[in-house]
């Protein structure tokens, strides 16, 4: 197992390096820079002399390859650089956003799992029924709902009309504040999980070993619990792993809407002012989160299905 | 048109006055929940390190400058100085500082002013706020590296500072800036961004990056009996729709409105009585690049001004959340000519002017634009059919904000649509269009007119305010006549507030920046915020 973890950890390095290179190249060719973004403020346009000094301070006057080398050298020493915007180390800018993002992703996934998996199971156990059709309507709707619109709808219903929950904001330790953003973010993975679970359960239910177990007189609840559920779990886990890994990056719209201080909104704000070190840092964190979650999923495979060898 | 403008201005003033009139007996205590609407984050709690209005909304609570802007009189007035004496040549100002304390207990003295201004102008620090120091004598030498400090800022004694400026303009216009606060010379500079230590009415209690800034009353604030509020929460909320829900739900106490919300709020009986409106000092315009041959001819530029029905666009697209622009200076400017008439919507006249200029068969140009709803692509799309009627073909060049300024500063555009500052200081903002002002400074349309230059130079040397104002008025009228831009609108900033909120002011500089020390909430506020 340790060899597997070590190997997967080492495999992350080229992935991260590729991401760094791609972002670096993209922001080198797209027009606009941090310096020109300071000029777009209108009333408070920064004077040209200050801009020249800023250019020098941040090394933006150096050739592209020199800047890339400096960045990689810093990265090799776990230094993500200095934010152009705040003039603080990039890690200091990202770190306060990390836990709110993780918390939101976990809660959204929790909502998706608690609602989506049972729905998928129940729909598959009664295929073709009204419940099954209804579940699939919910699933398709959930997948196609724009998060912004759905988030606003939740605000109107649960904050404005019913007054049950706050419509926005972040309070460390407050469950009330996370409910609406978690549902808005979790509705799409919930729908996907419901569909995946239904398809997986239907597939397993038609398998030979299930038919055999049923012929041998195994009670239906035990059949579902011991044979169907365990076999579908790998599929569900894969879907959940991919979804939870992607949620941090997908949360941009929801974070913006609910004023949630996560990595996604930081990323958008940084792109708009071309704060490239923060963009790179934020993307690296999102990619690292995705890779780590998927490694954990691979490890979990071995625990729930002895036939799978992770080493 | 002018009657309508006057009426609108009167209405705006009326709304504002109504909001102020009820502020007779301020009540102490309570919390005011405000919003910073220009994004979901702020850059820094050290305002000298950022040029963003979003940060200024917070800085206004934390810091104080030598002067402050008086939204009611429309002029700068002394703030940290209790008196000032001007020398006979009109270039040296001697300030007596008031007794005031920083949040950490340090007392304000002349060394703090000298240190703050030298820090701000220090070229090694490259602080955006340095812009406000440029009028002071010796700043140019300091920034060029030929002097090790600003010669024009001197301590006379602990409570007296002398500042010498390079021209006859009132230094208050620059030194009132929230980007030029006075900091304590003894406070660690590296903590200013995270643990600010200002002279303002509120001190930092908690900052959640990307979400909110919580501030509490500073008991030793220098103004007697102020601030009234015990707590000030500033929520960082970039989404207008989310702010709308939060405001209607009573979670926030004031909300800056966009065109869509403005229309809805003014039609809602429950909301329409608590709206503050002001004509902000921003002029939305399409700038013409004279490197396009057709734009070298004044008649073409005038024709475009005549061919577009600005009022219709303001009515239909901006939902009347703007005032039609007459010239560059806004209606609130002292140098605005009350008798000036805007370019009339007259397609026939536009056609005639184009024919006269030799463009009877038409011309074509692209407008670089962001997606801004009030001065971006939607507006360009609206003018396309209007200009097509007079034979002018317009295409769009969509970009984001950073690219827009990049393209303008690198002269890589044919025309652009933008919102530019046009006040409050008419001399400063008209100087942008002197031929000696570079495109990268603020002469984006490379305007060059000898007569205009002469008027500006004369205004800069004039000591009589009335005469100076007259020269500036003439320059503004000449600029309108030359039409280097399409004069579109002046922003009508609108803020909705809860009925229990008092003391908000119609700040024409930026409505979202308020004098927090004057705000108070009455007993009708939600219990938790009383």
Image (cartoon, rainbow, N blue to C red):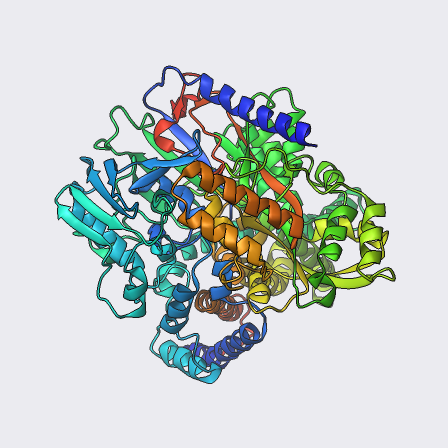
Q: Is residue B178 left or right of residue A114?
A: left
Q: Is residue A30 above or below residue A233?
A: below
Where residue A174 appears, as percent x and y from the top left, is 42, 40
Farthest left residue?
A: B157
Where residue B471 appears, as percent x and y from the top left, is 51, 44
Q: Is residue A263 left or right of residue B187?
A: right
Quarter of the rendering occupied by the C terminus of chain B: top left
Q: Is residue B192 left or right of residue B37?
A: left
Q: Quadrant of residue B327?
A: top right
Q: Is residue B458 above or below residue A279?
A: above
B37 or B166, which lies in front?
B166
Residue B519 visible, this angle: yes
Total label count?
A: 0
Where residue B157 appears, as percent x and y from the top left, is 12, 45
| Residue in view at x 51 percent, y 44 percent | B472
B490 or A140, which lies in front?
B490
Q: Is residue B404 left or right of residue A137?
A: left
Q: Is residue A189 above or below residue A73?
A: above
Where residue B328 appears, as percent x and y from the top left, is 59, 46
A107 or A151, which lies in front?
A151
């Amino acid at each position: 197992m340790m060899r597997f973890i070590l190997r997967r950890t080492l495999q992350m390095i080229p992935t991260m390096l590729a991401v760094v290179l791609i972002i670096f190249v993209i922001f080198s060719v797209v027009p606009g820079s941090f310096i020109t973004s300071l000029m777009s403020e209108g009333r408070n346009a920064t004077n040209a002399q200050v801009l020249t000094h800023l250019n020098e301070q941040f090394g933006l006057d150096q050739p592209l390859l020199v800047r890339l080398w400096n960045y990689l050298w810093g990265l090799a020493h776990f230094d993500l650089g200095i934010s152009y915007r705040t003039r603080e180390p990039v890690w200091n800018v990202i770190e306060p956003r990390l836990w709110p993002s993780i918390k939101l992703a976990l809660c959204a996934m929790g909502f998706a799992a608690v609602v989506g998996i049972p729905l998928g199971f129940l729909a598959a156990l009664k295929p073709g029924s009204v419940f099954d059709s209804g579940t699939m309507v919910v699933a398709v709707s959930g997948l196609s709902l724009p998060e912004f619109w759905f988030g606003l709808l939740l605000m109107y219903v649960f904050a404005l009309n019913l007054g049950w929950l706050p419509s926005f904001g972040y309070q460390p330790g407050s469950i009330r504040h996370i409910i609406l953003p978690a549902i808005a973010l979790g509705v799409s993975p919930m729908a996907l999980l419901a569909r995946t679970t239904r398809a997986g359960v239907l597939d397993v239910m038609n398998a030979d070993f299930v038919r055999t177990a049923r012929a041998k007189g195994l009670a239906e609840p035990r059949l579902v619990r011991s044979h169907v559920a365990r076999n579908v779990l790998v599929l569900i886990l894969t879907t959940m792993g991919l979804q939870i890994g992607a949620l941090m990056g997908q949360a941009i719209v929801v974070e913006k809407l609910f004023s949630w201080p996560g990595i996604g909104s930081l990323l958008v704000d940084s792109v708009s002012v071309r704060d490239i070190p923060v963009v790179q840092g934020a993307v690296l964190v999102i990619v690292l989160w995705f890779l780590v979650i998927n490694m954990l999923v691979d490890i979990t495979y071995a625990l729930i299905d002895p036939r799978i060898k992770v080493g | 048109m002018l009657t309508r403008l006057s009426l609108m201005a009167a209405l705006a003033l009326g709304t504002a006055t109504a909001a102020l009139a009820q502020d007779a007996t301020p009540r102490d205590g309570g919390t005011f929940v405000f919003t910073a609407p220009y994004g979901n984050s702020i850059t820094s709690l050290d305002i000298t390190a950022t040029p963003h209005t979003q940060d200024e909304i917070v800085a206004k609570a934390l810091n104080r400058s030598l002067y402050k802007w008086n939204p009611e009189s429309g002029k700068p007035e002394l703030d940290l100085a209790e008196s000032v004496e001007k020398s006979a040549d009109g270039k040296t100002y001697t300030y007596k500082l008031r007794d005031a304390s920083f949040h950490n207990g340090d007392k304000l003295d002349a060394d703090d002013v000298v240190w703050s201004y030298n820090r701000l102008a220090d070229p090694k620090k490259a602080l955006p706020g340095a812009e406000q120091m440029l009028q002071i004598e010796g700043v140019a030498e300091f920034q060029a590296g030929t002097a090790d400090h600003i010669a024009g800022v001197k301590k006379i004694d602990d409570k007296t500072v002398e500042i010498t400026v390079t021209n006859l303009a009132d230094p208050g216009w620059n030194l009132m800036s929230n980007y030029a606060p006075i900091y304590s010379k003894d406070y660690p500079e590296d903590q200013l961004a995270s643990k600010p230590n200002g002279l303002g009415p509120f001190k930092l209690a908690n900052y959640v990056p990307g979400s909110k800034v919580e501030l509490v009353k500073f008991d030793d604030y220098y103004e007697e009996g102020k601030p009234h509020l015990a707590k000030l929460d500033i929520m960082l909320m970039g989404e207008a729709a989310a702010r709308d829900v939060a405001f209607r739900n009573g979670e926030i106490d004031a909300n800056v409105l966009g065109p869509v919300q403005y229309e809805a709020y003014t039609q809602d009986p429950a909301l329409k009585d608590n709206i503050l409106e002001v004509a902000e000092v921003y002029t939305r315009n399409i700038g013409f690049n004279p490197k396009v041959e057709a734009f070298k001819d004044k008649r073409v530029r005038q024709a475009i001004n005549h061919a577009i029905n600005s009022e219709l666009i303001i009515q239909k697209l901006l939902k009347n959340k703007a005032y039609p622009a007459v010239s560059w200076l806004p209606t609130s400017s002292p140098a605005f000519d009350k008798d000036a008439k805007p370019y009339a919507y007259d397609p026939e006249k536009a056609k005639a002017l184009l024919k006269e200029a030799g463009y009877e068969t038409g011309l074509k140009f692209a407008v670089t634009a962001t997606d801004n709803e009030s001065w971006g692509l939607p507006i360009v799309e609206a003018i396309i059919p209007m200009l097509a009627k007079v034979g002018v073909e317009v295409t769009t060049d969509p970009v984001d904000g950073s690219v827009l300024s990049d393209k303008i500063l690198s002269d890589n555009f044919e025309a652009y649509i933008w919102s530019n500052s046009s006040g409050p200081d008419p001399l400063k903002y008209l100087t942008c269009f002197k031929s000696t002002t570079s495109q990268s400074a603020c002469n984006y349309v490379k305007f060059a007119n000898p007569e205009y230059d002469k008027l500006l130079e004369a205004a800069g040397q004039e000591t009589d305010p009335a005469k100076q104002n007259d020269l500036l008025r003439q320059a503004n009228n000449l600029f309108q006549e030359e039409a280097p831009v399409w004069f579109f609108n002046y922003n009508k900033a609108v803020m909705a507030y809860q009925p229990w909120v008092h003391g908000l002011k119609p700040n024409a500089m930026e409505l979202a920046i308020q004098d927090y020390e004057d705000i108070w909430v009455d007993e009708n506020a939600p219990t938790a915020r009383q």
